[in-house]
Image: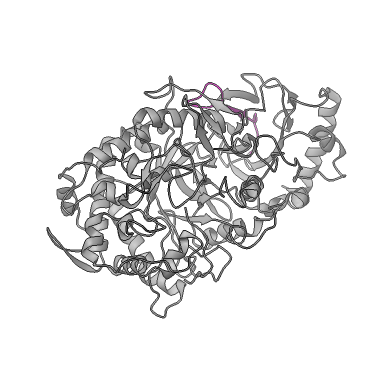
Amino acid sequence: MRAASFRMTRRAAPALAAALALASMTGPGPASATTAKTAPATTTTTTTGAAPGAAAPGPLVVAAKRQSLVFRDGDGREVTLRGFNVSGSTKLYENSLLPFRSTADAVRSAQAMRDLTGANVIRFLISWEGVQPSPSTIDRAYLDRAVEQIRAFTGRGIRVLVDYHQDLYSSHLFHADSWYTGDGAPEWVVKAGGYPRESCGICLLWGQNMQTNEAVRRAARDFWRDRRVSTPEGEVGVQEAFLRQATAAMTHIRQRLPEQDFAAVIGFDPFNEPYDGGLDGKSGLEWEKTYLMPFYQRFRAAMDAAGWADKPAFVEPLVFWNTGFFEEGGLSTVGALGPRYVFNSHFYDGARMTIDPSPASDGVYGAAMNEIRDRARTLATAPFVSEFGHKLSGSGSDRTPWMVRAAYQAMDSGVPGKNWWRTPAAGGDVLSSTQWHWDLYSGRHREVMNRNPAKVRTEGDAWNDEDFSVVAADASGTLATRLDRAVLDRLYPSAVAGDVLAFAYEDLARSGYGGAGQQRAWLAVPSSLPNVAALVKDRRFGVLVWREPAAAPSAPTELHLPASFTAATTVVVGDVATRAGLPASGPAAVATETGSSTAHRLLLSPSGAAPGTVHAALVVGAATGPAVTPAQLTAAAAELAAWKDQRFPS
C-alpha cells in the first residue's frame, strides 16, 4: 500500500545452477515479537484443511479479445478476478513476515473471504527478508509456511497472485525512534549499504520518504543500479542477490505446491510500488526504460528458470504514475509487453487522501480506470489493479465507503452510471483487482516498531499508523466486514463464455458505516425503459452483455451472486432466460461457490446459440419490494431485448 505524496517526481538473469545451490541452504525464520467500525456481516469457519469437496481452480492465460487482452480459463471463458491483499501483516515481525501466524488462521480467513464476499483471488505478500535472512541462507521453513497458507485459499476456489512486497525498501533503514518504518530488504543488505541516518524532514504521510529521505532514496538507487556491496560472506550485487533468492524461492514454491494448487497461482508480482531513488536528469519514462523494464526482464527469466514459464509477471510502473500530482512513468515507452506480462497498476486517490475534501460520486474514477485500461491495451497485455482503497478510521474515513464504491463502479465500467444505458459499449473491459486489504488481526496487533520495545503498535494495521483492513475479528475470532457488505460482496461476471461487451452493477451501498448514511442509486435507468426501471426500483441489480464465442462453449457463463440475491428472490431477465427464482438446473440456475456452502453463483447456459450471438441478462435482487409478476417480466424482457439490439447490433 502507498500513501499519497505532495511532491511526486518521478544484465542477464542469474544462473539457475547458482539459484538452486542457494535454494539448498536453510536457516531459521525471522524472530517473532510476541475500535474497529463493523457491520453485522460475520462468519465462523473450520480451522484446518481444504473446504470439503472443494478443488483448486484451473490455470489462466492472457489471451486476445477483439480490441484488448483479458484473462481466460481452460474453457476459454473471459475471467474477472476480484479479491483482496493478504496482507499488510507480512510487514510485521509479530507475524514472522507472513500474512498469517498459522495455517489455521489462513484457513479461517480464506473461508470468511469466500463466504462474505465471493472473492476469487488474493494477492499473497511475501518478504525478501523472510526468504533470505542471510546472504547464504534461503529459509525453506518460511517458504513452507507460505505454501501452506496459499493452499488454504486455493483449496477454496481462490486464485493467488504472489507478491514480493516492499515499502520504503526495508525496516532496517529506520532508527528506533523514527516516526516511520519500512519492509522488504533484509538487514544484511542494509548494513552492507552503509546508509546515513534516515530522516523524512517535514513529512505528513509516510510515502513522502520516497522523495525526501536520503537513506531510503540511496538504498533504492543501489538496488536499481545493482551496486556491489561487501558482506561477511563475500561481495554481491544487490539486485543480483534479490534475483537469485527469488529464483530459489519460486523453485521451492513450485516444488512444494501440488500441481492443482500451483495451477491456481496466476503469476508473480516482482516488486511492489517501485520508486526511482534518483532519476539522474532523466524523465520517469526514461528511467522505467533504462532501469525498471530490464529488471522485469531479468525477473521474467528467473520465473522461466524456476518453472513458472506459463505464468505472467505482473509488472508495476513507477509508483506515483497515476496519483494526480506531478506524475511520472506508466511504462508507456517500454514497447509491447505481450501476454507473458500483465500491466499491474495501483490506484489511490491522492487528492482525496490529502487536500480534496469532496466525497466520491457516480463516475468519479472512470477516467482513472480507463487510463489503466488504455495503458494495458497499448502494452498489448491485460490490466490488473492490485491495490486500491482508503483508510477506515481517522480524519477523512467518513468518505471511505463511497470512495471504495466508486472504485468498484469504475472497474466494472468506465462510463458513469447516469450515462451507462446510453453508451454501455464505451465502458471497456471489466477490470480484475485486489483491494488493500484483508487483515485477520486488524486492531489486535502487538508489533514492536523498529525493534523499540517502547513503541509497541496495536491499533489498525500496526504499520505507519494505517488502518485499511475491510474486516476485523471479535474476541471469539469471528470475522466481520467493517465496510457496508454491499460494497464488498458484489455481483460480478466471474467467468463468461465468450467476450464481455458491457457490465454494470448497482450496489445501493450506503455512504456510512454500520447501515448509516445515504443510499443513492448511481446506475440510473432512463425513461425509455419504464418497465426495466420499475422492476429494479430500490433494488440491487446488474446487467451483463456478452457475445458467444466462435465454438460452442464447454462451460456456462457465471456471475457471483451477493448474499442478498437469494435463489428464491433473484430475478433474471433476458434472452437466455426470464424468470423469478432460480432453480438448481436449467438455462438460468444457481449453484454454490467452490469452497463455500453459503456463497452462490448464477449459471447462464444459452441453448443452441449461433457463434457471435449477443446475449443480455438483467439480474435483480428482488428480496424487497412488491412481488414480481409474470407481466412485469415479459414487459421488461421486451424492453431489454430492444435495447440490446439497438446498442449492440449484430
Q: Is residue 525 magenta?
A: no
Residue at image position (67%, 52%) is 427
- Magenta segment, principal secondary structure? loop
Asked if residue 311 shows in the view, the reply is no
* Residue 335 place in picture, x, y as percent: 45, 67
Q: Is residue 625 left or right of residue 472?
A: right
* Highlighted range, magenta: 593-610
Asked if residue 481 shows in the view, the reply is yes
* Image position of 451 with respect to 83: above or below: below
Q: Is residue 609 magenta?
A: yes
* Image position of 70 with respect to 596: above or below: below
Front-lying residue, 551 or 448: 448
Residue at image position (20%, 68%) is 228
Check the image and tell me how it is coloured: one colour
| Quadrant housing residue 270 | bottom left
Q: Is residue 247 left or right of residue 455?
A: left
Front-lying residue, 271 or 536: 271
* Residue 279 place in picture, x, y as percent: 40, 75
Front-lying residue, 416 or 362: 362
Residue at image position (82%, 22%) is 627
Residue at image position (74%, 33%) is 574
